[in-house]
Image (cartoon, helix red, strand yellow):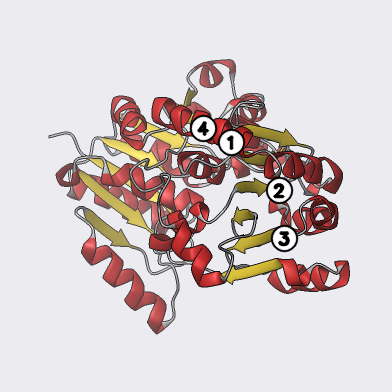
């Protein structure tokens, strides 16, 4: 019986977009033919308990290493090889190609017939650094397929590979659960709870880190308020940048028009998207291309919810927007163009409706999890 071993650091309950990507894909594979080998999220008593509780709920086998970060060391490689043999796995999926894909030759020798490694934004960064570039080349040579999120990441990563490995690359982006993210997902209740029922709302759902561009939204807000005085910027998510963002809102004089929700449980995210009239995350590339947006699944989740989107031009973010149809792409980090697009959308309900409907249609056509999971099954 064909079985697959997933080897990854990126797995819930550790939060994040890559983690959600892998978990959603895993849930759509045959649970009796799947084993996940992952790191432990946190070594604290609470972290270990949360991880154990999560693993117990899964329909497939999850094996945790005690370390919080798997690396392709001899010990980790031996454990992966042991799991491959113990469970009779014939295929391997590395949830992130770098650096765990360096274990591919050992797993091949142990009996893996198909090895797939998924690339994200950080592999595009690796492709720009000489030493890391060579390691990425080795990973490409020793796997059957490297998957990529979109055109931007493929172009960056392919340049580091042999022509043969580049030719074997296949697109496998994350998907959207269109049954979870949809118009009418509970946004009215969130608006009422926050006292925003009759106010225009620009919503941003993301971790609070500089790349995501929440600071650009705050800097754009004075111009937006001049045109639409009742507008509220709803910033959903937690992260290390929150204190700086709160200070910026105060210094810019717009603190009264910015709401921070902090981290929100996964089950409440659809309703928080739905609380917005417009979704905006003007992400930007930082650190000379090393800190870049791989795709930006939040734009697609917003589209599934029926919102027009304003996206930054970092990395693969434009791949998640049909520019001029489901929303607009703006130069990341520039408040002026961001403000202009927000003002246009907030002032035109019919335009918001048309873009939102087109976004929902596009998600249903291209970005559904079930379609993408079938593609992964074929690769494996």
Q: Are marks 1 and 4 in contact (CB under 8 Å)?
A: no
Lower position in the chain sequence, tag 4 or tag 2: 2
Relative height, residue 234 to residue 77 (above, below): below
User: Viewer-nearest of labels 3 and 4?
Assistant: 3
- State left or right for residue 241 relative to residue 148: right
Q: Which mark is residue 136?
A: 1
Residue 134, position as x, y percentages in the image: 64, 35
Kindly identify which residue carries mark 3. 230
Viewer-closest of 111 and 68: 68
User: Viewer-nearest of labels 1 and 4?
Assistant: 4
Viewer-closest of 35 and 374: 374
Residue that lies at the very extreme toward the front in this rendered image = 198
**Label 4, label 2: how many angstroms apart (C-alpha)?**
27 Å
Relative height, residue 106 to residue 197 (above, below): above
Residue 190, position as x, y percentages in the image: 48, 64
**Label 2, label 3: how many angstroms apart (C-alpha)?**
34 Å
Badge 4: few (under 14), some or many (20 or more) residues near its Cα, within 10 Å? many
Kindly identify which residue carries mark 4. 359
User: Viewer-nearest of labels 2 and 3?
Assistant: 3
Lower position in the chain sequence, tag 1 or tag 2: 1
Viewer-closest of 103 and 179: 179
Kindly identify which residue carries mark 2. 291
**Label 3, label 4: how many angstroms apart (C-alpha)?**
26 Å
Residue 36, position as x, y percentages in the image: 30, 52
Relative height, residue 240 to residue 176 (above, below): below
Lower position in the chain sequence, tag 1 or tag 3: 1
Look at the numbered disc 3 and give the secondary structure of its residue.
loop
């Amino acid at each position: 019986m064909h079985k697959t071993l997933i080897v990854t650091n990126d797995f819930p309950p550790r939060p994040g977009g890559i983690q959600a990507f892998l978990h959603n894909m895993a849930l759509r594979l045959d649970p009796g033919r799947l084993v996940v080998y992952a790191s432990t999220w946190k070594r604290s008593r609470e972290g270990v308990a949360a991880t154990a509780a999560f693993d117990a709920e899964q329909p497939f086998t999850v094996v945790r290493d005690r370390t919080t970060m798997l690396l392709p060391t001899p010990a980790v490689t031996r454990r992966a090889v042991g799991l491959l043999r113990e469970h009779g796995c014939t295929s391997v999926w590395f949830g992130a190609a770098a650096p765990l894909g360096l274990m591919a030759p050992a797993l091949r020798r142990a009996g893996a017939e198909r090895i797939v490694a998924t690339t994200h934004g950080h592999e595009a960064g690796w492709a720009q650094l000489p030493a890391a570039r060579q390691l990425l080349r080795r990973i490409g040579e020793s796997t059957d397929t490297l998957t990529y999120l979109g055109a931007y990441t493929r172009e960056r990563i392919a340049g580091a590979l042999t022509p043969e490995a580049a030719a074997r690359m296949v697109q496998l982006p994350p998907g959207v659960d269109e049954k979870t993210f949809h118009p009418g997902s509970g946004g009215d209740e969130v608006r009422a709870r926050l006292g925003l029922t009759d106010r225009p709302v620009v919503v941003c759902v993301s971790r609070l880190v500089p790349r995501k561009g929440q600071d650009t939204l705050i800097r754009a807000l004075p111009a937006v308020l001049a045109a639409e005085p009742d507008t509220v910027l709803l910033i959903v998510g937690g992260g290390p940048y929150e204190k700086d963002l709160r200070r910026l809102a105060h210094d810019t004089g717009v603190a009264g028009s910015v709401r921070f929700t902090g981290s929100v449980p996964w089950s409440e995210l659809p309703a928080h998207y739905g609380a917005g009239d417009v979704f905006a995350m003007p992400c930007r590339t930082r650190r000379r291309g090393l800190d870049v947006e791989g795709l930006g699944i939040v734009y697609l989740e917003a589209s599934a919810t029926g919102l027009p989107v304003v996206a930054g031009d970092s990395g693969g973010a434009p791949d998640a927007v049909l520019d001029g149809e489901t929303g607009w792409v703006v130069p990341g980090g520039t408040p002026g163009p961001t403000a202009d697009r927000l003002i246009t959308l907030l002032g035109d309900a019919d335009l918001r409706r048309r873009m939102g409907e087109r976004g929902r249609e596009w998600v249903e056509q291209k970005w559904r999890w079930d379609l993408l999971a079938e593609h992964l099954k074929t690769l494996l």
